[in-house]
Amino acid sequence: MTDIDQAVDSARDAVVEFVNGEDRSLGHMLLGVAITAGFAIAATAFATRTIRPAPAVEGDGRPVTERPRGSLSLILPAVFSATTLSAVRVWNAPSRRERSVALGLWGLAQTVNATWLALRPAGRSSQIIAAMTSAGLAAAFAHEARKLDPGTGKMAAPMGAATRVANAIDRKVSDRATLH
């Protein structure tokens, strides 16, 4: 085997392990990616198009609520990324009641988060309600995902996802000499 073949095999194995797809076909894994990413995008698009906040106007006549532009519009989809990756792992888990519950909670969380993004709550109480519902649904999803696979549950939790990625990078880097 050449170095390229080994690199391709290593990358393929890492992806299969990452999406929890050891016992699943490639078609099943791709379908899971399509469904989870598609649902997150569709929920956001639907909520953004159907829920129009009444724009409050500042003293200079500009609306207070408007769509994010520039780099912020690229950051908002990241809200969905950790849970979407975790949902792919849940999708690839063996069929059990916990899997169905976790996927249902994930779908509900995506829909609620997309709705809050579209509504753009301005008042303190509505922002607290938005944060609490989002955090509660994320925690419920992470709890159910953890029943299927501890790594999936860690990935679903916002701090768990960041910590897991940082630890994985640290393990890879600590085995190699640094450039400085």
Image (spheres, rainbow, N blue to C red):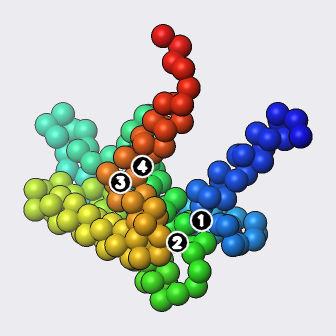
- Near mark 3 (Cα within 10 A), the count class, few <14, some 14-19 or many ≥20, is some
Query: Is 173 drawn above or below residue 73 in the view shown?
Result: above
Q: Quadrant of the N terminus?
A: top right
Residue named by callout 2: 90
Name the mark on residue 164. Answer: 4
Which quadrant of the figure has residue 5?
Answer: top right
Which one is in front in this view, the residue at disc 1 or the one at disc 2? 1
**Relative depth, front residue between 179 and 134:** 179
Circle 2 residues within 10 Å: few <14, some 14–19, many ≥20: many
Residue 158 in percent (x, y) is at 34, 54
Disc 3 and disc 2 in contact, CB within 8 angstroms = no
| Pointer 3 with pointer 4, Cβ within 8 A | yes
Residue 140 seen in the figure: yes
Give the vertical position of 167 relative to 19 (above or below). above
Left/right placement of residue 124 relative to residue 61 reads left
- Residue furthest toward the top? 180
Q: Describe the element under mark 4 as helix, strand or loop.
A: helix
Residue 41 in view: no
Which residue occupies 56% across, 26% down? 176
What amino acid does circle 4 point to? Arg
CB of mark 1 within 8 Å of CB of mark 2?
A: yes
On the image, the x and y values in percent for residue 127 come to 17, 58
